[in-house]
Image (spheres, rainbow, N blue to C red):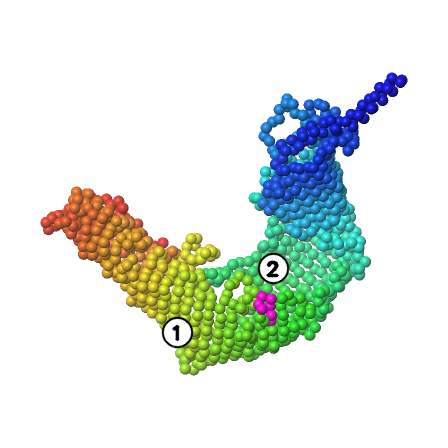
Amino acid sequence: MKKALKITGISITSLILLILLVPYLIPGTISQEIETRINQNINGKAEFESTSLSFFTHFPSLTLSLNNFTLKGSAPFQKETLIHAKQLSFRLDLSTIFSKQVKIDQIFLDQANINVQVDEKGNPNYNVYKSSNSTPNQSDGASTAIKIEGIFINKSNLTYNDQSIPMKVSAKGLNYAGNGDLSQAIFDLKSNARIDSLDLYYNNSPYLLNKKIDAKLVTKINTNSLDLMFNENDLKINTLPILFVGKFSFLKDGYDINFKTTAKETDLHNIFTVLPPSIANRMEKTTIKGYAEIKASLIGKYLAKQQIMPTLSFNIKVRDGNITNPKAPEAISNLYLNLQMKLPGLNPDSLYIDMDSLYFNMGKDYINSVVKLNGLKKPTVHINTRGSIDLTKWSEIFQVSNLKGIYTIDLKADGQFTKKVVRSGIRQVDTVNVIPKFTLKSSLRGGYFKYPSLNASIDQINFNINGHNTDGNYKHTQLDITDINLQALSNYIRGSASIQPGQMAIDVKLKSMVNLAEIKQFYPLKDLELNGELNMDLQSKGIYNKARKTFPVTAASFKLANGRIKTAHFDQPLTQIVVDGTLTNKNGTLRGTQVNIKPISFVMAGQPFMLKAAVRNFENVAYNITSKGTIDIGKMYQFFAVKGYNVKGTLFTDLSLKGLQSDATAGNYQKLNNRGRLIVNQINLQSDLFPKPFLIKNGVFSFAQDKMKFEKFKASYGQSDFTMDGQLGNIINYVLSPKAKLTGNFNFQSKRIFADELMVYNTPKPIPGAPAGSNGVILIPSNLDVTLSANAGTVYYNELQIKNAKGNLALKDGTLTLNQTSFNLIDAAVNMDATYKSITPKSAFFDYHITAKEFDIAKAYKEIKTFRTLATSASKVKGIAGLDYQLTGKLNQEMMPVYPSLKGAGVLSLKKVSLSGFNMMNAVSKATRRDSLNNPDLRDVEIKSTINKNIITIERFKMRIAGFRPRFEGQVSFDGRLNMSGRLGLPPFGLIGIPLNITGTQDKPIIKLKRNKEAKLEEKEED
């Protein structure tokens, strides 16, 4: 017995000594091995202050601890911390310490901060594990094996911030225990997780705040395919139990997700505890009862770089709901809800909502609604909603004391909100709205609203709305608003309004008075100061139809006295604002319409402006308009902070215009009394016909009867500049009648004109509907009858430089006519008479007669694109030629000739020409074996031709070359085909000749010594 006790005592003592001594005998070996393993298997940087070995940390196993452990993340977050823990520990199997393999079976993370980051491109910071394609040699003497059976996280915090979604999750007080054989390729991980406080933000908006989480999870992990299978998972968020199943797979650039959650047969109160804080916080003292079910799923691939996102689905059912709040006068009862929501690809524009029923009561109040929505940009909706609610009750529920009134609604809507683009010009695009078909009845009685931060309220809010649309065309909408009554302090709006946009029909009775200084007491005005009293009295009923000469019977007055406006965008106010105007019509005709502005005036930056106008009889307008003062347009845009514009310039007026439209139309100008001046400086003007704006640098316009005289007028357009003086006529008739034309005559001068900038589609950004890669033609306005005496230094057009252009220009009926025009082109004096007319933005017509006594053929080939196209074989021809030609045809969308459309006739005179390298003559020389015909020099040869349907027909012409007398005639096509006849007259007098048959192309002519009996070249009709 004593011997047994002795042996036992010795064994126990030895074991205790072993437990105490082992940590001191082998810590260096174990620590060094762990550090080596970490460094070999990560791409990040790991640091720790010290290591320790102990049997007592997780008795009876030996535990290696890395104290104050820090791990940096992977690129692009390599400078930021991924994990910082007070202690990272590894439990070692004591039985393996002295074997060939030391087994690490559990990992502990204590008091850690885990910071997971994903950037906007989907790059995470946790890719620190260094993968290896090599297979470990099982027979080597590896001293350590990591065979993890458990992972434990204690008293830690986790942040997951994914900017590519964007979503942020923050978990505080995280405690996690996970058990499983992690060394296996496929294993089950049993987990228990508790979180004291969980926050979830999506797109910077909170959806969960301070929620407690308790989860029991069983996860099957496949390390070969990096798949996670969630098979048996019970999750509780606050008091809401959720069944959670699914699959999560790691992909090269993202994840493959299949998550499904269900909360079946739960109490409705449990759902409210996990709602976003904006709702849940208001329900703290609310009693909620009822039956509810929730289903949610997130399924699909998440590949941020390819912008591929999973689909989110959410369904909820509520039955027999009852919500009671101590501050609410009555409970919400009979709550019934069926709601389905789907967000394919997490794309908001693909949002689908199907609420096929929502119903509840609050005493006598009720809501019964069906809402279906598909998409956001062009949503398709189906709505059937009826309800009657006391806003006072709801303001008490939501602790809002600034809302009162009885509101009723009965709305049925079915269709799509979309837009149609209707082109009203080249650059002018109108957007036409298409709306759902609907019927609406709505009213508010005893309404009241007050901003909490302001002293005064908007009270006595009353209105009735009745509206309908039967086909979705917004023009066919009928909207009636009756019993309008709004009161705020001394301000009010009272009346009714009925509108039919399609028929331009109105029935409006409105009276209002607004003390602008009082607005800030009941409506928040930021950076805006107002003063003045605005009165309006409007009564108008009828249809506006210009074609039928009808106008609503109207009596309207607008008055503002002593007005003042100050904005934060400009340091000086608009002061002394006076508006006094009336619009009257007693018989419903255009003839009976009268407008009287008496006046509109204001002062801005010390500059006064005033406008008075009396206009009557819109069938034969009688006008009496005076205007005097200065408007600084740049300051005005700055004053109102109009975005997207950089406008400057001033406008000064001192005008008195009085007369009758019929006198202007009939030419009875002596009966008109139009006089005064208009001075502009640095003003931009944009026309739909031209891609760039015209900048009027300065201009003085004086008025006399129907004429407007231009003085000191300087302007620019793109890189072009010009000055003008002269006058426009028929001004009044042009303004008052859409068919009237401006007349006038001007002297026009310019240093440089870039004609290509006038081409209709020549813009940096493409115009919808414009042909791809096309600049279009130059459009000529059709409402002008103007002549100009023009002088331009240089005109840049289609790679040409036309210098010293002088002549007379006429613009009439959309046609440009040039008379006695002279210019220099390729250093040659040219005279031209021409006509140009734009047909469409893509085509134009021209007709010109051009004469050039002498021009250099080599320069023409080098600098004129059209000449190179028509005379491809003249690349080496040198000398002087003359031209006298009449040509007519069409231009395409690049302002280049449409060759099949060309018709013309004229003479090309070869003054002194060397046909060096001229293929046809060299081919004739070779065929007739007469070397003297090769590269000949010619003098005083006239070649007459006509052009029609892509064919140039050349009349017979003769030449003299070294005693020979060749002659030619026939046809040449614009694509270079030849069909020519010729005769080579032999010395001494050419009485005997060799017949020539010339076919092929200008580049490769075919010469046969025989008569040409072949048919004519095939003509090409215009497309």
- Residue 727 bears which disc, if any? 1
Give whichever of 109, 710 is nearer the camera: 109
The x, y position of residue 356, in whole percent, is 68, 52
Residue found at the far right of this picture: 1
The x, y position of residue 34, in whole percent, is 68, 31
Name the residue located 39 percent from the left edge and 74 percent from the top edge: 727
Q: At label 1, which amino acid type do we have?
A: Gln
Q: In the structure shown, which secondary structural element does the residue marked by tag 2 occupy?
A: strand
Give whichever of 327, 15 is nearer the camera: 15
Which residues fall within the magenta stretch? 565-571
Name the residue located 21 percent from the left edge and 45 percent from the top edge: 922
The x, y position of residue 56, in whole percent, is 79, 32
Tell me the crowding category of disc 2: few under 14, some 14 to 19, or many 20 or more residues within 10 angstroms, Cα based: many
Tell me the crowding category of disc 1: few under 14, some 14 to 19, or many 20 or more residues within 10 angstroms, Cα based: some
Name the residue located 62 percent from the left edge and 66 percent from the top edge: 527
- Left or right of residue 808: residue 26: right
Q: In the structure shown, which secondary structural element does the residue marked by tag 1 occupy?
A: strand
Give whichever of 501, 259 is nearer the camera: 259
Give whichever of 637, 1006 is nearer the camera: 637
Name the residue located 69 percent from the left edge and 34 percent from the top edge: 220
Pointer 2 or 1: first along the chain: 2
Q: Is residue 59 above or below residue 426?
A: above
The x, y position of residue 826, in whole percent, is 29, 57
What residue is pinned by disc 2?
437
